[in-house]
Structure formats: structure tokens, C-alpha cells
Image (cartoon, rainbow, N blue to C red):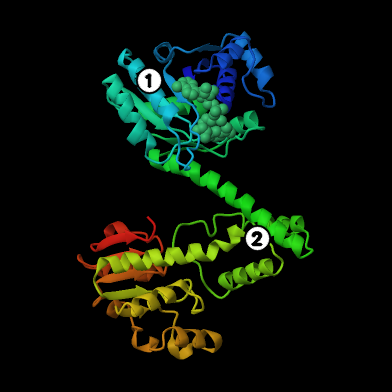
Amino acid sequence: MRISIFGMGYVGAVSAACLARDGHHVVGVDIDPVKLELLRSGRSPIIEEGIQELTREVVAAGRITVTDDVAAAVRDTDLSFVCVGTPSSPNGRQDLGAILRLAEQLGDALAHKSAFHAVVVRSTVEPGTVAGEITPRVEARSGKRAGTHFAMCFQPEFLREGTSIKDYDNPPFTVIGSEDERATKLLRDVFAHLPCEFIVTSLRTAEMMKYACNAFHALKVGFANEIGRLSQSLAVDPHAVMGLVCKDTRLNISPAYLKPGFAFGGSCLPKDLKALLYLGKQRDVVTPTLASLLPSNRVHIDHAADTVLADGRRNVGMLGLSFKTGTDDLRESPLVTLAERFIGKGLSLRIYDPEVSLARLMGANKRFIEHSIPHISSLMCADIDSMIEPSDILIVGLQRRDLLERIVRLARPGQLVLDLVNMPDRQDLRAKYKGVCW
Ligand SMILES: NC(=O)c1ccc[n+]([C@@H]2O[C@H](COP(=O)([O-])OP(=O)(O)OC[C@H]3O[C@@H](n4cnc5c(N)ncnc54)[C@H](O)[C@@H]3O)[C@@H](O)[C@H]2O)c1
């Protein structure tokens, strides 16, 4: 395939060399004449394992040429990858200067091209940037429509500097944000040989997931280092600790706890986090990542409460009270915190939780709920129907399939369902629907 690449930095230079190695004809474009000159003479503008040899080979074979002429690069290729930088502005916002200037140049170039052309953004950009910022500029300058004359896609890049050729050849997956079949097919032709899944999703999802990946990596580093400093202060070997933590692929290194939903609670997570933070305080070990977790959890509960309070209606029904489905443990349950907030605001509350039978509660669990919600017995419903019927707002905090089906069947138009558990079958609801963070 004939491919143009805009931006010969880390991403562009590695992509150019690997695509040329894979047999494609690549046109490299940059505004920096030094980088173009280096490439012209067979040298890569970046330092990476194996990149100099590979660049020398593919330039000598005539499969990479370079230019600063955007119009020629677009005219002579079928597919363009945009790999220009999107650095931080002083306030943290992405600086789109380079990519938007390029969008206008691409638009000018497309104005003179009649054949279909696909533009694939590989620079990391905020969700909505391709459709909201880049595409309109290309359309305005070309006088053509995305989806008709040309396509705009987003494909996050997962390579890491230092191991970029290896990462290019072994990505975790290929993710394509595309709403254009023709562009998707071109990208499939270029990347389908890679030993990973090829996933097509929406532009916004592809844009957001790249940020989510990098934030997750940063979170992991911060977490591991804070456990390291705490371990150091406690004369524990952090490598042994984290080695064991990582061996658990059921709960730790797994999708567990990584689904957007409601806040955490229960008798262990908040208690043990508090104990760990106290240990750090005693030893002057500062752990901002760990310290942020309880406040983050509170913000999430506040967000759910505010969604209900903003509705203005006062009859609220809650499905679920214990800290998770399948238990009657009410200690530190975020649903109890929610219930307390509603009672404090004078709302009329009805609760149904099939696991919570007040007569059977014992010990610390019983003391906790009697202290938190003294007149809890007057709020509990005997069945789900008597919770649904008089309520204006239904909060779904429990995942039992038969009960969710009952909500879907009985919730009326005019009622609001606030979903904390990612309800299946919600498309069949007649009530208005809101997800807690979706
Ligand atoms: N570096 C990485 O490991 C990595 C990994 C994944 C994603 N990304 C993302 O990819 C993008 C590029 O990153 P990078 O590290 O390769 O950047 P970089 O700064 O190394 O390279 C960007 C290149 O774009 C060129 N450029 C600027 N304006 C141009 C224009 N109008 N036309 C042509 N070229 C132009 C610059 O001269 C420079 O050579 C960023 O959005 C980054 O966040 C980077």
C-alpha cells in the first residue's frame, strides 16, 4: 500500500520503518528539515534498538521517501497516518496547534484529490478531538465530506520508547476508531497480520481508551512505589510483596474491580486502607495515591446522591443495601451512606434487599446499621414490588437477575431508574434511565 506518515518523531519514524519493512511504500513528512535530511540519507531521526539498521535497509530499498510537500504526499498515497506531537500546554490541556495546522494542510491537499483517501490519527488526543476539531477543519479546507470523499479514523499507538520496534510487532491489540468501512478495510490490510486481536470501535472510545491506558500505567507505578516506600519503612521486602500481589491473576492482575460501577465498601477495603494510611503517617511515609482512594470513593457516592437530589422528586426506592450482592454485610456499605444522605435531606425512602433480614442481623453488622439508620425497620420493604410501586426514583444497587428483570418489567414511564450495576436489558425499560457514571 502507499502510505504517508505526518510527523517523523518516535511514533512516525518507527511506524515508517516497520511499514516499509512490511512491504509498503512510505512517504515520510515533517516540518523539520534536519529529520528529513537524516531519513533521506538512510539514518533514523530517533535512537531506538534496531531502528538505524532497519531505516538504512528500507531507505536503500527505496521504500521510504521523504518530503515536506503535504499535497504531494496525500496525492501519491491512499492512507495517511498523523503522528505529530500533542504536548501539554502549561495548564495541562493538550496543545493541538501542530495537529490542527496539519488538518488544514490535509484539507487543502484533499481538495485536489478525487480518489478516496483515509486519514488515521495516531497522535494521542482527547475524546471528541477527531470528530469535533480535526474533521471540521479538513472538511472546511477541502470542501469535501468525511465519510463520503475521505475518511477520518483514530488508531491509538501502544509502542513504548526503548522497545518500540518490538512493541510495534507485538501490540496488546489493534484498536481502530472508525465509522468508515473502506478505511477499516485499508487498516485491516495493513495490520491484520499482527499477532493480536483487531478491534473496531467508535472514534471517541478509541480516543479515550488511550488516555485510560496511560493513566492506568501511571497509577500502577504510583501504587507499586507507595507500597515500596511503606514496605521499606516496615522492613518488608517490597519486591516479595508485589511479586506475590502480581501472582494473583484472579483478583489483582485481572478485570476484577475494573468495571465502572458504584463505590467500594464492606468490612475490609475501607478498614484496611485506613490502617495502611495510619502506618504511613506514623512513619512519615507520604502516600498520595493510596490517600486519594477514600476521598475518590466519597466523591462517587456524592455523585450518585446529587443525581437523585437534582431530580427534585422525593420518593426514592433502593434495590440493595448491603455492600455487595449476595451478602447481608452492611458495614461501610456505600448504599447505607446513600440512604443516610437521602434521609438527612428529608426524602421518603423505601429499601428492598433480599439478603438483608433485620431479624437475622447479628453482632457488629446489627450495631452498625442500628447506629447508622436507627429506624431502618420502617424503611425495609417485604418485596420488590412494594418498593417499586410508590417510588419516583428507583436506585438499582444489586445484581440479581430476577430482581433486575422485575425492575425492567414494572418500572413505569415517569419513574427514573438510576443504575449503579450496569443493568443488562435496560433498553427494554419504559422508565427514564441514568447510569451512575455512564
Ligand atoms: N513517544 C511515544 O512513545 C508515544 C507512544 C504512543 C503515542 N504517542 C503519541 O504520538 C504522538 C507523537 O509522539 P512522538 O513522541 O512521536 O512525538 P515527537 O515530538 O517525537 O514527534 C512529532 C513530530 O511531528 C513533527 N511535526 C509537527 N508538526 C508537523 C506538521 N504540521 N507536519 C508534519 N510533521 C509535523 C515534528 O517536527 C516532530 O518531528 C503524540 O501525540 C504522543 O502522545 C507517543
The image shows residue 137, relative to residue 407, as above or below, that is above
Question: Which residue sits at x=75%, y=55%?
Answer: 239
Mark 1 or 2, nearer chain start = 1
**Residue wearing tag 1:** 106
Tag 2: residue type?
Val
Q: Is residue 202 visible?
A: no
Q: Which quarter of the picture shows residue 226?
A: bottom right
Question: Where is residue 432, by image quadrant?
Answer: bottom left
**SS class of the residue under badge 2?**
loop
Q: Are marks 1 and 2 in contact (CB under 8 Å)?
A: no
Point 55% across, 86% down: residue: 364
Q: Is residue 23 above or below residue 88?
A: above
Q: How many marks?
A: 2
Q: Which mark is residue 275?
A: none
Q: Amino acid at mark 1?
A: Leu
58 above or below 217?
above
Residue 170 lies, in percent from the top left, at 61, 34
- Residue at 62 percent of width and 52 percent of height: 222
Find disc 2 in the rendering and name its residue. Answer: 286
Mark 1 residue element: helix
Is disc 2 surrounded by few (<14), some (14 to 19) or many (20+) residues within 10 Å?
some
Q: Nearer the viewer, residue 307 or 206?
A: 307
Q: Residue furthest front?
A: 90
Residue farthest left in this picture: 414
Image quarter (top left, top right, bottom left or bottom right) of the C terminus: bottom left
Question: Alpha-carbon neighbours of circle 1 within 10 Å: few (<14), some, or many (≥20)?
Answer: many
Quick one: 283 or 321, which is closer to the camera? 283
